[in-house]
Image (cartoon, helix red, strand yellow):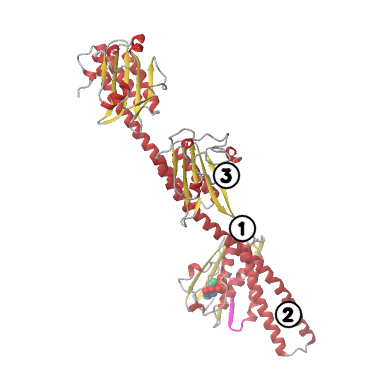
Amino acid sequence: MESPLYDTDLTPNEQRRLATLALDVSGALIKPQPLTTILQECAEALVRHLDAAFARIWTLDETGALLELQASAGCYTHLDGPHSKIAVGQFKIGLIAQERLPHLTNDVLHDPRVSDPAWAEREGMVAFAGYPLLVGEHLVGVVALFTRHPLTEMMRQALAFIANNLALGIDHKRAEEKLRVRNEVVETLNHLGQLLSAELDLQKLVQAVTDAATHLIGAQFGAFFYNVVNKQGESYTLYTLSGVPHAAFAHYPLPRNTDLFGPTFRGEGVIRLADVKKSPRYGNNAPYHGMPADHLPVASYLAVPVIARSGAVLGGLFFGHAQANVFTERHEQLVVGLAAQAAIAMDNAQIYQQAQSAVEQREQFLTVASHELKTPLTTIKGYIDLLLRRAARTGNVPESTLHSYQVLEREVGRLTRLMDMLLDLSRLHAGRLHLEQEPVDLAGLAHRVVTTLQPTLPKHELALEGADQVLLVYGDALRLEQVLQNLAGNAIKYSPEGGRIGISFERTSDRVQMAVSDQGVGIAPADIPHLFEEFYRGDERVTRGIAGLGIGLTVVQHLVEAHGGKIRVTSEVGKGSVFTVELPCLAG
Ligand code: ADP
């Protein structure tokens, strides 16, 4: 097609005006502005460069049945009134859309399509030109103008050219807008998906779903009413709101089993209403028979039940808008998708909360049980001490009785250590395992441990190396002694045949290493990564059924790390193990 800009029939002046109009329109069409602003600029350019009385641009709505006035320039600039919405096929504008053909006349007073000749005469209108805005076969709108002078060839050509440009511009802008909305939907859903998979706090989760859904479907407000069960097993309803402050709803009763809300709470399916007030479901129930007088005005209504995997109804998502006809099928699909995601996340949050409360109960039990058991144990220990002292003083207790006392003392000692470990574990869970902070000499500490342990060990030889220097660390002497005792205790326990137990120290400028080695049963490679886990016990075939609770190393690791140190282990089954503790040390 020949470009009108180069038509040689036009005078140079006309060519110039045409070029300026084309430039103004193209310039407007590429601006990053809302479509209505762009179209208004185009209409103004038409009036300005073609001496039109007024020019208007309509776009076709989503249904394809209605033209909506988007821009009006010249002597009429209002966008409301009888021409603001024109059905395709109605009036001259609707006919242009229906026929997809331009309509031009230089005699508006006698044109049968001009519906109000009296108006045309009064206003001095002479010519009319209307063009369908077409992209190929696809209609996107109509542009039209009235002039008080006849249309020239230049204007006809200009309009054909501008109509083409406008159509492409509108189409492009709409595609861009669709893409933007789609991107925003994808982004919001992605973000929400990430959030939901990580969020275990029910309240936050439900709020995020309400906000995202309200935003995505352009609702004026959204609400999520959801059922929760408290610790006493009682069920009650909570809600989150989006788009309106809580105060806006605070004084209403919760939505009840009315004809409108009931089906959602019963999980009976989605309700989408163009105008809730015109629905037969609306206004049937006392006391309000509709919305309370001061309720936010709602016309468009969308309600989607949120149903758990088990089939239980977890709640419902409700959305409203003061305008009618706002929520589309696509919006409904979006919210149904969100409701399904929300249901899964709420299920997960509930499972987590149940697990959490089971953990809390276990912690409580551990603390109470270890305290309760410790008290009588201390009393028993006191009496055994008393009996032993009395026996020593009088000297007339038979050997077998004395032996029983000693067995009792040893077993009570073991029981006390076990209870202490359980207590430590419960303190550790509760974050109440506090450390003293003072300089401690590890070498001195190791000497003390060896001196007390050695006489009780008939089969083992305790060898201390590298402890002939002061090894100062900053920490809790009792807890550090506990670490060494525990590691040495394990070394002895897990080498039932006896052998050498080495406790050796090595120091660098700022670290000290303490290694506890044995020649015992060793540790299966598969167990090594798990040894420090709570209640983890090594392979029975290797440990040969040696008794234990699997707590010692958990506490040891915690204590070492609380001192800024690290613990590691190397071992070979049948040969023995080495536990190495590395701690930051003080100069000296
Ligand atoms: P417990 O000894 O009560 O089982 P610990 O937490 O102290 O608990 O140790 C966890 C596991 O590590 C033990 O069950 C055992 O399998 C293994 N283990 C610990 N120390 C040694 C060691 N010196 N030799 C062999 N196995 C050991």
Q: Which residue is mark 3?
A: 254
Is residue 40 rendered to the left or right of residue 559?
A: left
Quadrant of residue 379 within the rendered picture: bottom right
Q: Which mark's residue is nearer the viewer, 1 or 2?
A: 1
Q: Residue at x 40, y 25 (%)?
A: 37
Disc with the residue nearer the chain's start (2 vs 3): 3
State if disc 1 and disc 3 touch (CB < 8 Å). no
Residue 563 pos. (x, y %):
60, 61
- Please state the quadrant of the image where ligand 1 appears: bottom right
* Front residue of 218 and 313: 313
Side (left or right) of 26 relative to 444: left
- Of residue 206 and residue 268, the one placed in the foreground of this image is 268
What's drawn in magenta, residue-wise?
457-467
Q: Is residue 465 magenta?
A: yes
| 2 or 3: mark nearer the eye | 3
Q: Position of residue 404 (x, y in %)?
A: 69, 85
Please provide percent x and percent y for residue 527.
Answer: 48, 71
Residue depicted at x 52% and y 58%? 351
Question: Which sits earlier in the primary sequence, circle 3 or circle 1?
Answer: 1
577 inside magenta stretch = no
Spatial separation of the CA atoms under disc 1 and disc 2: 46 Å
Q: Is residue 370 above or below residue 586?
A: below
**Label 1: few (<14), some or many (≥20) within 10 Å?**
few
What's the distance in space between the residues labelled 3 and 1, CA to CA? Answer: 22 Å
Label 2 sits on residue? 384
Q: Which mark is residue 232?
A: 1
Q: Distance between the Cα atoms at labels 2 and 3?
A: 67 Å
- Which element type, helix, strand or loop, lies under badge 2? helix
